[in-house]
Image: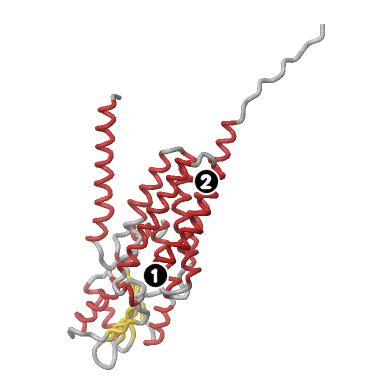
Amino acid sequence: MTITRRAVALGLAATAIQALMLIAFAWPAVNVGPRDLPIAVAGPASAQIAEQLRQRDPEAFAITTVAGVEQARNAMADNEIYGAIVTGNGAPQVLVASAASPAVAQQLTAVAQQLSGIPAAPVQDVIAIDPDDQRGAGFGSMVLPLVMSGLAAGVLLTLLIPALGARFAGLAAFGIAGGLLSTLIFHTWLSILPGSYLELAAIAGLASFSVAAVIVGLAAAVGRPGIGIGALTMLLIGNPFSAATSAPELLPQPWGAIGQVLPPGAAASLLRSVAYFDGAGAITPLLVLLAWAAGGVALLGLGAVRSRQTSTPVTAPEPVTVPA
């Protein structure tokens, strides 16, 4: 293949990647809507409200009936539901948790207004988002920098550090320092998230480490193409389907669920859980991040084993002398 043909081929490949990125980022944004969104209903007219919701859209909500307001509050505090509609004493009252998803809180408020016919239906934000980031825009903007910095660290360590053991040391340094510094910015300076600085720093560091470890591990195991595989997975699937700006149940399925088993989505869910819900629902995203981090390290170890095997010289056997 001539240089010109190779250049044209690379240009066409870049065009295909551009189209994929447009689809990956724009398609979820224009298809946001509730899909089995967990909510609760309570009060004497709970059955009627549930039936009205099902008639509006049978697949929009996963509805649970609870005994009363306190039970609904407890379910929200346990990060089991996004909100509740409570009947009795006039127009239905809506309980929302904007900390779980400002987008869901807005949608539930709109639904309550339609059900009650009152433009200003009573809404109570039980678990409110940080007042310095009321729309959740700051939180949503955190995911991409964590992904991009992890990709950059993985690529730089792969290209500039030949020793695989030294790459692991670089990964550890990036995870620790990156977690501490990024949390200093979004927690202490910008006040995007409340909660313990060290806990949030550990999560941010683990998320950054897992992304970088995947890049370094894939490159060590399968070569330079591993960089592209890891980068495309994190950018084209992990980031747009992380649900950092919405909720997994608002995204087209199964992509909303797939996004939660990748580091960006798991990191967003884990940060929300620790910052606002005292760790409720944190086990699954934590295990996801640990699995990706361990997988990246395991691939790096596999690459180290293969490197030793290929670099070990094969010595010819000594000739055997036969006595006359």
Query: Residue 176 in the image: x percent, y percent?
Result: 51, 59
* Residue occupying the far right of the picture: 324
Q: Secondary structure at mark 1?
A: helix
Q: Secondary structure at mark 2?
A: helix
User: Which of the 4 quarters of the picture holds residue 98?
Assistant: bottom left
Viewer-proximal residue among 207 and 323: 207
Mark 1 / mark 2, whichever is N-terminal: 2
Quarter of the image for the N terminus: give it: top left
User: Which of the 4 quarters of the picture holds residue 191?
Assistant: bottom left
Query: Residue 241 in the image: x percent, y percent?
Result: 33, 58
Query: Residue 313 in the image: x percent, y percent?
Result: 62, 27
Q: Count residues near mark 1 (Cα–Cα under 10 Å), then give few for <14, some for 14-19, many for 20+.
A: few
Identity, as a three-letter code, of the amino acid under mark 2: Arg
Q: Residue at x 28, y 93 (%)?
A: 89
Q: Nearer the viewer, mark 1 or mark 2?
A: 1
Disc 1 and disc 2: Cα gap in Å?
31 Å
Viewer-proximal residue among 116 and 52: 116
Query: Residue 210 in the image: x percent, y percent?
Result: 47, 54
Q: Residue at x 49, y 58 (%)?
A: 177
Identity, as a three-letter code, of the amino acid under mark 1: Trp
Check residue 167 in the rendering and tell me which mark sits there, or answer none.
2
* Residue occupying the far front of the picture: 189
The residue pinned by badge 1 equals 189
Q: How is the protein colored in the picture?
A: secondary structure
Q: Residue at x 28, y 35 (%)?
A: 10
